[in-house]
Amino acid sequence: MDENEAFTSKRRRAPSQKRSRERVEAILEAATGLIAETGSDAMRMSEVAERAGISIGSLYQYFPDKSAIIRTLAERYNADGRQCIESALDEVRDMAGLREAFGGLIDTYYGLFLAGPVMRDIWSGMQADKSLREVELLESRANGELLAAVLKRLKPGADPEMLARSAFLIMSLGESTMRLAISVDPDEGAALVETYKRMVLRELAEI
């Protein structure tokens, strides 16, 4: 068992039965509501248990602490985002199509952050929690691999290691840009996202 597997095992008990799965969903729904209302910093495990309609002991059987709940929510948002990226890149057939698809993805992501208070809360606090920083890094690598696969298909003669590094950096900088954009005034945030988009599309044009 590697370090990530050990952390996941420690984090919460995997729901193997229908009732357990339903209980986990109720917990996550309760936590989502509380985060949307007051933010993750103010959320208390006792409040989550009360809103989910379970005892605090039952809650701890699935999630040992608040960080485990937030991490699970972050992983779910990331999975949705990864599916969005896969769908957008799946039909790309040339570099012009890649730039168009990627520019659209940037706009879509920023729109999701603006519309989702829970997603904003989790992302804005990621750097304060080591486990969430690990989630972000793993997600950057996974998304970078998706972009790198397209680049390698479109640029078979290019250095694959260079393409992989570029893709990883593009995705990592994108996540940092989104986190910065939602922490400042909306007008400034939109300008930062547009600047990132211009930089990335220029880089993709030069690869």
Image: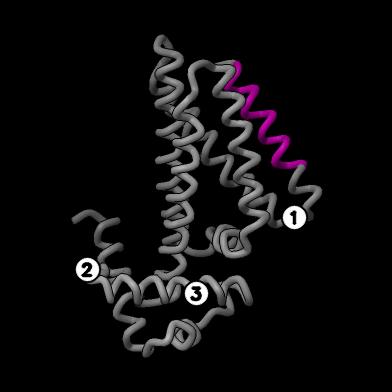
Residue at left offset 70%, top offset 57%:
183
Task: Give the magenta-colored segment's residue range.
Answer: 191-205
Residue 165 on image: x %, y %: 45, 29
The quadrant in which the C terminus is found is top right
Q: Earlier in the sequence, mark 1 or mark 2?
A: 2
Residue type, mark 1 in image: Val
Name the residue rendered at 42%, 61% in the picture: 131
Q: CA distance from mark 1 to mark 3?
A: 25 Å
**Which numbered disc, 1 or 2, marks the residue closer to the eye?**
2
Q: Position of residue 119 (x, y in %)?
A: 57, 59
Q: Nearer the viewer, mark 1 or mark 3?
A: 3
Q: Work out how far the residue at label 2 is from the one at label 3, CA to CA, in angstroms.
A: 21 Å
Identify residue for label 3.
Answer: 31
Q: Which residue is mark 1?
A: 184
Q: In the depicted view, which residue is nearer to us: 77 or 185?
A: 77
Give the mark nearer the N terminus: 2 vs 3: 2
Quarter of the N terminus within the rendering: bottom left
Q: Is residue 98 above or below residue 37?
A: above
Q: Which residue is mark 2?
A: 16
Q: Amino acid at mark 3?
A: Ala
Image side of residue 33 versus residue 76, left or right: right
**Count of number-bearing discs:** 3
Q: Is residue 19 above or below residue 158?
A: below
- How many neighbours does mark 3 have within 10 angstroms: few (below 14), some (14-19), or many (20 or more)? many
Query: Which is nearer the N-term, disc 1 or disc 3?
Result: 3
Of the pair 191 and 55, the residue shown nearer to us:
55
Q: Residues within 10 Å of mark 2 (few under 14, many from 20)?
A: few
Q: Is residue 193 magenta?
A: yes
> Looking at the picture, which amino acid does disc 2 mark?
Ser
Q: Determine whether 80 is above or below 33 in the image.
A: above
